[in-house]
Image (tube, rainbow, N blue to C red):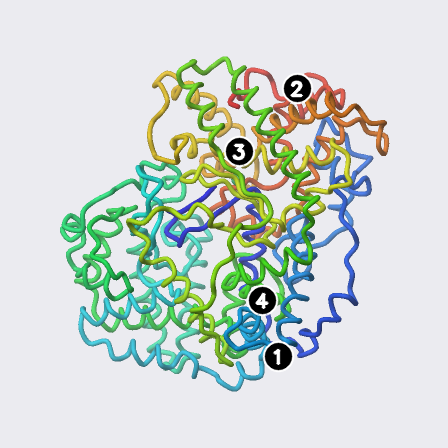
Amino acid sequence: MSRTKSGLRPTTTGWLGRVAVVLAASVLISGTAKAQDASPSVAQRAPLPALRVVDPGFIDTTANACVDFFQFAVGNWLRTDSIPAAYSTTGVGKDMTDRNELVVRSVLADATARRDSTPPQSTEHKLGTFYATCMDSSRAEADGLAPIQPLLDSIASVASRRALLREIAALQVRGVDALFNFYPNPAPHDAAHYVAWLAQGGLGMPDRDYYTNKRSTADSVRQRYVDHVAALLTLAGESQSAAQQDARRIMTLETELARSSLTRVALRSPSATDHPMSVVRLRLLASAVDWPSYFRDVGVSAPVGHVNVAEPEFYRRVSALLQGTPLPTWRAYLRYHVIARAARWLSTPFVREDFAFRSRFTGAKELLPRWKRCLRETDADLGDALGEAYVARAFSPDGKSRARAVIDGVREAFRARLERLTWMSDSTKARALEKLARMHEKVGFPDHWRDYTRLEVAEGPFVSNVFRAKAFEWDRTINRPGAPVDTTEWDMTVPTVNAYYSPSKNEMVFPAGALVPQTFDVGADDGANYGSLAGSWAGHELTHGFDDEGRHYDAAGNLRDWWTPADAQRFQTQADRVVHQFDGYVQVDSVHVNGRLTLGENIADYGGLLTGYDALERALERRGRPQLIDGFTPEQRYFLSFAQSFRESTRPEALRTRVMTDPHSPARWRVNGPISNSPAFAKAFGCKPGDPMVRPQELVPDIW
Ligand SMILES: [Zn+2]
């Protein structure tokens, strides 16, 4: 599901919400890697064992499939595998990412080694330089604060509200979280064109709820944040007492922003962020900002007539805060956010403080090796340059065509399910079928690669290259409002182990990095591939087009109510069953899953399971039933594959963070939740009414 309204720059969360967490952990990485890390031979020296779509070795044969299927399917793996110290989670996402990262590292090592022979303006040269300057930890140590001193000096010179706004604009362009978010996004009611979006933002903790919630542990989290802000300011040269005072003021300011920010649950309703307005009205809403000047400062070249203000209340508050908060507090706030953005690339004391704070949310015990951090930053900033080389080394046309065949099978199966639905009227059904027919799919890699001609990459310091890359991306897109939406663009990079559905483009996207074992194997049986690729990937993404959020968008991606009121009511009744089901599961300790936050993903998992199963049955009819494999029928392998595709073990700290920030449920419930609703599962494993994995019929949701 594309999430362009979370107060972030447009991002996506797809099937593997957990990978986002794996990647988020990339900020926790070491500043002390050895130079040999860059050697291309490392990848060859340390081959990783092959992954299988269904691995019988993961099965816990002592567990009862009808009592706890997750335990049955991966229990042996859970017993024998442990989470590496530098990670918050391990399992499918990490295993596949590890393998993709070895390919990416070989690309980067080659680009680095060939720098003397490639033209300085070539993309390969830039790629090599970007990565090499990142790996140069001794330079980071020697430079200290110097790379960001010009930005800090500029902030220190802010002496008026006008200069303050100019400074905020300049920092936003460089990717610093300064006060709010501005970016082009498809217009809610005209998805074929971009409009300028203004969204909430400006916080240093992972969610607004950390500032406002009243849980017993909340105060200590807030105190730790104040200490962290003070620690970074002290490292940057402030006296301890001044830094403490600034940190408390920053906390007060951010708490005001948090209080006027929408919760993640509220953000799930597309109408909550649908507020198109003229700039004249925007000036009335937030009069402390001289908007035409702001637009000019961030590089918009044509006059802006209309914007979509995702959270008007937030902007009202921003305006009041701009007027009422003293300039020294604003300077401290901006200083902190610049340091926080850069800390992971500065010298060891900054890296350590950054890690220590973030590990509170992830549970990671140590920093990742520097090469992984550098690789991930390169992927984030020069993704297409990497993707092109990745595809050449690691993606076969065979894989693409077989994956497409499976995905097409899922479409067919979903269409048949739609036609059979009994709770939906014919008129709504006709529109649902139209939406399905017009849903696009992208598989593997983009048709066009991004042009990096205008990106400048210098010999260092690395943090300056990061700021340049963010500014390059900003300049590339900021003048889009009013222009037709680029339908060829991808929101995930090619080596990414994830997939997504975009409601405004009405399309599913499967990067090449996701179409490898464990989730997909050209040589595997249908039972295995359909359980994983079809069930938990393609069927999942497709169902997002019809979940509690996606259903509000029509076939063209416009926010438009195409449901009869009675059908919408019936959908709601069934969706509430899903909410209730997941509210009943424990996330960690005594904290329960948030059924409303995870509703869309849970509907998608359930729809994916049912649709993928139907697609398997059709494939078996077409292609014939194979013999038992490892003693299992194709149907049993389907459910094993589905369950193993969620193989994951996560630290409690990360589970606590995710219950507030992640729309996905924990792995065990992503498996046992939908599977316990499936009669086909009960049949395949001979489970009886009353077994824990067979939910009473009156509680089972009937949606897609
Ligand atoms: Zn999803």
Q: Quadrant of residue 525?
A: top right
Q: Give coordinates of residue 697: x percent, y percent.
A: 59, 16
Q: Secondary structure at mark 4?
A: helix
Residue 670 shown left or right of residue 647 in the figure? left
Q: Give coordinates of residue 551: x percent, y percent.
A: 42, 30
Q: Where does label 4 land, which residue?
A: 373
Assess disc 1: are there few (<14), some (14-19) or many (≥20) residues with their C-alpha within 10 Å of its C-alpha.
few
Q: Give the residue drawn at x 56%, y 42%.
A: 15
| Mark sitting earlier along the chain (3/4) | 4
Q: Quadrant of residue 556?
A: top left
| Mark sitting earlier along the chain (2/1) | 1
Q: Is mark 3 within 8 Å of ligand 1?
A: no
Q: CA distance from mark 2 to mark 1?
A: 62 Å
Q: Where does label 1 land, which residue?
A: 117
Q: State if disc 1 and disc 2 touch (CB < 8 Å).
A: no
Nearest to the eye among marks 4 and 1: give it.
Answer: 1
Q: State if disc 3 and disc 2 touch (CB < 8 Å).
A: no
Nearest to the eye among marks 4 and 2: give it.
Answer: 4
| Mark sitting earlier along the chain (4/1) | 1
Residue 542 got which mark?
3
| Mark sitting earlier along the chain (4/2) | 4
In the displayed structure, 285 sits above or below 122; it is above
